[in-house]
Image (cartoon, helix red, strand yellow):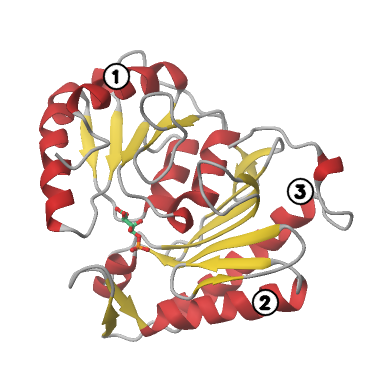
Amino acid sequence: MHAFIDETHLPDDVTVTALRELAERLARSAGELVRTGRPDRVEVASTKSTATDVVTRMDADSEALLRREIAAARPDDAVLGEEEGSTGGTSGITWVVDPIDGTVNYLYGVASYAVSVAAVVGPPDPARWTVLAGAVHSVVDGRTWTAGAGAGATLDGVALQVSEPAELAQCLVGTGFGYDAGRRGAQARVLVEVLPRVRDIRRLGSAAIDLCLVASGELDLYYERGLNPWDMAAGALVAQEAGARVTGLHGRAAGHDMTVAGGSSRVAELVELLEGTGADTDD
Ligand code: IPD
C-alpha cells in the first residue's frame, strides 16, 4: 500500500477527498440498514468455507444496498464484495466492500461488527493495490473511522495519530482466527508464543474494527493470518494514515498470509517474533 498518491494518476473526475466522503456515506448508509434491520433472532442463511463461516440475510441485503448506491454514484467503477464477488468496471477504481465484518458477532449480538468500504486502484489484491480512501462504520456504537491516501485518518472527524508503548511486553495486541480447523490449530500454536510476551490479547471479532482500533490507540498492535481483501482494505488504510506500519512477514506486503499493524518499533519486534514461530504458514 502506498501512503502518498499523485492525484494526476487518478481518473479525471476523481479526488481522494470525494472518494473518502463517498466511502463514509456508503458505510453509514449500509450501517443504518444493518442496525435498524437486525431481528431479535438472527438466522444463518448459508455457510461458506466451513460450517462456522456463516452468511446471514443481512450480509446479502447490506451488500446489495452498497452495490446499488455505488452504481448510482459511480456507475463505471468495479466492485469486489464479500458475498457477491467481483463486478467489472471501466474507470480503474474498485470498491472493496465488506457488508458486515464480524458476521459471527452480528449473529450473536456481540457489539463488534462493522461495514467496511474502500476505493482502490490496481488489482484487488492487498499486495498490489493502492487504497485511495476508506471508511469503517462500527454498527452498534456508530463510531466511524475514515482515511484518504496521504490525507490522514479520523475517528468521527477527529484526526488520529498512533503512539506506541516503550516495550512489546506493554502492548495490548488484537488478533483473529480463521474458520478452518487446521488453520486455527496453527494460529493457536503461534498464540502460545505471543501471549506470554505481551500485555494481553484481544479477539474482538472484526478485523476491520481491529485495524481501526490500532489507529485510535485502543489496541497497540494487531496481527492476523488469513485476511481477505474486504476485511482489511479500509482498516489498513485507516491504520496506516494514522501513522501505523502495516506489513506482512519476511519483507512482504500485508495481505492474506499475514497482516501486522501498529507503531513501527513494536511492529518490528512482533514481526520478528511471528517470523520465528512460522506464523505465516499453517504448519
Ligand atoms: C472475519 C472477521 C474476523 C476475522 C476473520 C474474518 P467476517 O470477517 O473480520 O475478525 O478474524 O478472519 O474472516 O467473516 O466476519 O466478514
- Asked whether residue 204 appears in the rendered view, the answer is yes
Q: Is mark 2 within 8 Å of ligand 1?
A: no
Quick check: 144 left or right of 17?
left
Which is more foreground, mark 1 or mark 2? Answer: 1
Q: In x, y percent, where is residue 55?
A: 32, 77
**Cα distance in 3D space between marks 2 and 3:** 18 Å
Badge number at residue 69: 2
Between 65 and 105, the one nearer to me in the picture: 65
The answer to whether 1 is drawn above or below residue 268 in the figure is below
Determine the residue positioned at 55% across, 34% down. Answer: 240
Q: Quadrant of residue 94?
A: bottom right
Q: Secondary structure at mark 2?
A: helix
Does residue 216 appear anywhere in the picture?
no
The residue lying at 71 percent from left, 67 percent from top is: 77
Residue type at the position of mark 2: Glu
Q: Is residue 228 above or below residue 69?
A: above
Tag 3 residue: 16
Between discs 2 and 3, the one toward the N terminus: 3
Considering every residue shown, the one lying at the far top of the view is 166
Q: Which residue is the site of mark 1?
A: 272
- Dot 3 falls on a residue whose secondary structure is helix
Q: Position of residue 232 (x, y in %)?
A: 46, 50
Closer-to-camera residue (201/52): 52
In the displayed structure, 226 sits above or below 117; it is: above
Q: Residues within 10 Å of mark 3 (few under 14, many from 20)?
A: many
Measured from the top left, where is residue 29 in percent x and y?
60, 73
Is residue 59 found left or right of 51 in the rendered image? right
How crowded pointer 1 is (Cα within 10 Å; few <14, some 14-19, many 20+) is rated as few
